[in-house]
Image (spheres, rainbow, N blue to C red):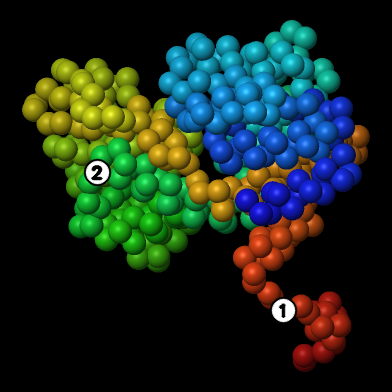
Amino acid sequence: MPVLQSIRKQLIRSQPLAGIRVVACLHVTTETANLMITLRDGGASVVLCASNPQSTQDDVAASLVKDHGLPVYAVRGVTAEMHAAHVAAALAHKPQVTIDDGAELVKQLHGGRSGCGGEVIGGTEETTTGVMRLKALAKEGLLRYPVIAINDAMTKHLFDNRYGTGQSTIDGILRAANILLAGMNVVVAGYGWCGRGVAMRARGMGANIIVCEVDPIKALEALMDGYRVMSMSEAAAIGDVFVTVTGNKSVIHGEHFEKLKDGAILCNSGYFNVEIDLEALGRMSHARRPAREFVEEFSMRDGRKVYVLGEGRLINLASAEGHPASVMDMSFANQALAVEYLVKKHSLLERKVYAVPEELDRQVARLKLEAMGVKIDRLSVEQEKFLSTWPEGN
């Protein structure tokens, strides 16, 4: 992660986070560990909890505690109750800056937790789903502190969401199910940046892609990208593998379960485990059992078998290792710079959701290109003048 390491060196020299308490609720992975160490080395007091019960890499959590002295509240495979307790324990450290992946910390702080939240000066949010939640809070005038939407940075959603999610989702599906995608009908629900990435990578594996969308513009884009576009009701009957990447709930539900092929595989790479209505699937089946690690078989009453991967949670983290470090390098570089920005500028910010400042976004892109040994052109003075005035070129 050369970009993050470059920023870490800057933070070590300037110590802009000295004395600042940072609580992060993120997937506990090796990449996240590097972000935590970077913030710690910039002067911050850092605490980490998991944003998903199935995504923690236990060896990473243990190493952060043992080798780096950082408090971590995370164990892979905990119950929902224990996960909530971990979040509460992290918040007991009274953060001044929050780092979220799904707005879990913001949700807890805005849900009336006594003694928490009063000292928070700002926060950051990593995901599309979390940003949607935060904008809804801000729209109602309920957001208590400014939050920077890391997900909206160009160097985040154009690369992390598209290339990272695309590759890691396919990785998770193949590790869990051990199937050949070539020739299969892969149904992608949602054609945002994550859906684009999944569709692109699945097509690269030889799959036939079907896209389901509710946004007519995105549906039209998918059609012109060469994919079949149809409703989930139509796709349910012909799909072999279904991947939800919408951030919404009940994207695949009872009506669709009735139409699924024998052997259909369902998984989620959106955010929460609500995109597939597992309660309805459980009611409609007469038996369920683990078929292999990360694969649960539901036996339907008419004899069909339906398979759900990773308990409907993020398949790229449930059965694989999430995004490669090279793409998280940019996302977490944005996180580190945004935290520094909040500490310096929080008194000037209103209680709303902000985009990552363009200069920070471009700084990350420049550092990434340098790390990859890529040089690009610069505008000449004459070219800059041409672009900023109107008389020339008529």
Q: Residue furthest front?
A: 67
Q: Quadrant of residue 62?
A: top right
User: Where residue 79 appears, x then y in whole percent?
Assistant: 45, 14
Q: For the residues labelled 2 and 1, say whether their Cβ atoms are less than 8 Å apart.
A: no
Q: Residue 377 — which label?
A: 1
Give the crowd class for mark 1: few <14, some 14-19, many >=20 residues within 10 Å: few
Q: Residue at x 32, y 24 (%)?
A: 278
Is 225 situated left or right of 339 in this image? left
Q: Which residue is the extreme one toward the top?
A: 114
As drawn, the label of residue 178 is 2
Q: Measure the alpha-carbon separation of dots 2 and 1.
A: 45 Å
Residue at x-position 22% and y-position 51%: 180
From this view, report whether residue 180 is shown above or below residue 344: below
Q: Position of residue 50 (x, y in %)?
A: 56, 25
Number of marks present in the image shown? 2
- Determine whether the residue tagged by mark 1 lies in a helix, strand or loop: loop
Front residue of 179 and 240 = 179
Residue 95, quarter of the rendered image: top right
Residue 133 visible at all:
no
Front residue (pair 317, 353): 317
Answer left or right for 198 relative to 56. left
| x then y, percent, for residue 98 | 72, 29
Between 391 and 201, the residue placed more toward the observer is: 201
Left or right: 241 in relation to 110: left
The local crowd at label 2, few if under 14, some if 14 to 19, many if 20 or more residues have their Cα within 10 Å, is few
Decide which of tag 2 and tag 1 comes sooner along the chain: 2
- What's under tag 1, amino acid-wise? Asp
Task: Mark yes or no: residue 13 visible.
Answer: yes
Return the residue found at the far left: 303
Question: Vertical placement of 3 versus 28: above or below?
Answer: below
